[in-house]
Amino acid sequence: MIAALAGVLAYFALALLGIVSARGRETAVLAVFAGLASLALWLPGFPEGFVGGLPWGIAVAGDLWALAFWSLALFLHAAVILHAWSKDSLRHALITLLVATCLAGSISRDLFNLYVVLELSSLLSVILIAKEGRSAALWAALRYILLAGLGMIFYLFGLGLVYGRTGALAITALSQTEVWDKPLRIGAGLLLAGATVKTGVFLFGLWLPQAHGHAPTEVSVLLSGLVVKLGVLALARLAEAFPLEPVLLALGLLTGFGGVLYALGEKDLKIMLGHHTVSQIGYMLLGLGLSAELGALLYLVAHGLFKGLLFLCAGEAVEAGATRSIPELVGKVPWPAALGLAVGSWAIVGLPPLAGFVAKNYLSLAQPIWAKAFLFLLSVGTAASFAKLLTLFRGQGGGKFGGIMLLAMGVIALGLWGILHNPAVLALQAWVEAVLAVGLGFLTYLLVREKRLPLPQFFLEHALLSVLLATVALSTILLIA
Amino acid sequence: MESLSGLGLSVALALLGIWTMVVRRNLVWKLLGLNVASGGGILFLVALSHRPGVRPPIVGLGPGPAADALPQALVLTAVVIHFATLALALALVILLTEYRHTQDARKLEEGSV
């Protein structure tokens, strides 16, 4: 526990040092090494302890989630530093601060501490999105801050209700209470709603595609790869404290298909990837809802790697091509970005033997047939949407490999590790299913390519209203269920 | 009764703030709504810790049972966070106004889609 806390503190201290000393790059590198050293010291985990002592201390624990989260965070941060080395020092320092927040959040097992971490990550994300200064990015950041603020108000009310009923804020203490009466149900619903807004679940977090799409390259890598996962982690903690599995299952289906529907017709490369982040969260929530915790965790790491890779390459492509539209980008993508896009798409549609395939299989292993059917449909939808990137895989001219190489190797290594680790993934049926899903997805793409689905556009008011209504619905469902 | 009215007031504040956020098109009004609603959340936590006949949880304020100190400690952090959120959001609004010369959410949205 001491090692992990020291690691988090060192990360924060180095980030602040980077801000005041204008040597953000160097301190960022130091911070990654400090994080690695701390991780090596607390490996393979530590039992729950209380920072500040009982009874009011903050519960922290180094469980499997924290371990996976730390590994992902440090890997992504290293890739971002490598790729964005030439960017200004302040940005590096702010990114370090954001990663430090995520590290702190992953070991926290206290509802209020999670609230603070979620808020801090929103604020830092907003600064990083808006720092580029273009008006579309500013608007996306403002949408983010308003929607996240609203969600966090619900979270605060839920926290109050839960504390008022049980007198506890620590996840472990909450999971041991026998109480599950009406105020507590509403409280759990409000907490859940707050965390889903932060995670970017469809209808709750309608800020996500724009914010991730308009952020600068290295920032969208971290937002999609890491910060969104902090919300998923909070949801996992909530699922541990309260019996929320059926609701998470429903939310997973909602966000999985909702995200894909919007991604299908999207022509803006980075915003399309944002819609896919919304959809991919569905896999993790389905994993949580089906009690396949290991599958959800593996998917979290896999998605962090391949979506990070996709956003990195998309950012490179958009910068090189000076346009964001997919049809106009054809023939303007530099080779490294084109290869990275190909590897990332290969992984996200779940083709063997990359990370996406392995994670999807861990999820669907030993699940009922209807759950498998939903996962299959989701894969078909993802493949149909990614089929429009096929024309971008042909590169033009050179570019820098840097972080693209590192992330691509991570995606491949995780895939190979998963296959060697679990022989069940090697079954012929799994491979046939994966190829079939992609084939069907491609056919769907050819069929619907010319059509534009008449989907409603969510302006800010609609997004706010949708958060409000979805929260009421969620609490009502928990109340009567 | 006091505690109950505090809870009722906090919910009313939150609803009022959220209502403002949804119906007002001006960004500054939206932020005001967010701030009022946050105030509701804070008041909710404070009101929860109150029981009839208790004294404030301050050392040296006399004998008798004190109110639960934990929610009040949490509120301090929440106040700071809300302050930071509001400051950051206002800075964004200033920048947006400089670029686009409007604070109307609908106009800003239509321009950036």
Image: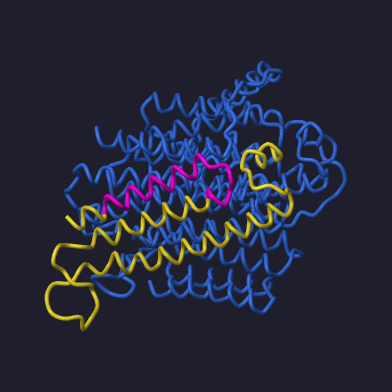
How far across and how far down the image is residue A222, in percent?
Answer: 60, 54
From what the image shows, is residue A462 above or below residue B14?
Answer: above
Question: Can residue A100 be seen here?
Answer: yes
Task: Name the foreground residue: B46 vs A404.
Answer: B46
Task: Name the foreground residue: A177 vs A83.
Answer: A177
Q: Colour of chain B?
A: yellow
Left/right placement of residue A109 relative to residue B92 reads left
Of the 4 image quadrants, the one containing the C terminus of chain A is: top left
Membership of B23 in magenta stretch? yes
Question: Which residue is pictured at 46% across the width and 57% down the height?
Answer: A118
Residues shaded magenta: B7-30
Residue A473, quarter of picture = top left
How far across and how far down the image is residue A152, in percent?
Answer: 43, 52
Membership of A449 in magenta stretch? no
Left/right placement of residue A328 relative to residue B40 reads right
Question: Which residue is pictured at 65% across the width and 42% down the height?
Answer: A344
- Magenta: predominant secondary structure element? helix
Q: Colour of chain A?
A: blue
How far across and how far down the image is residue A159, in percent?
Answer: 32, 54
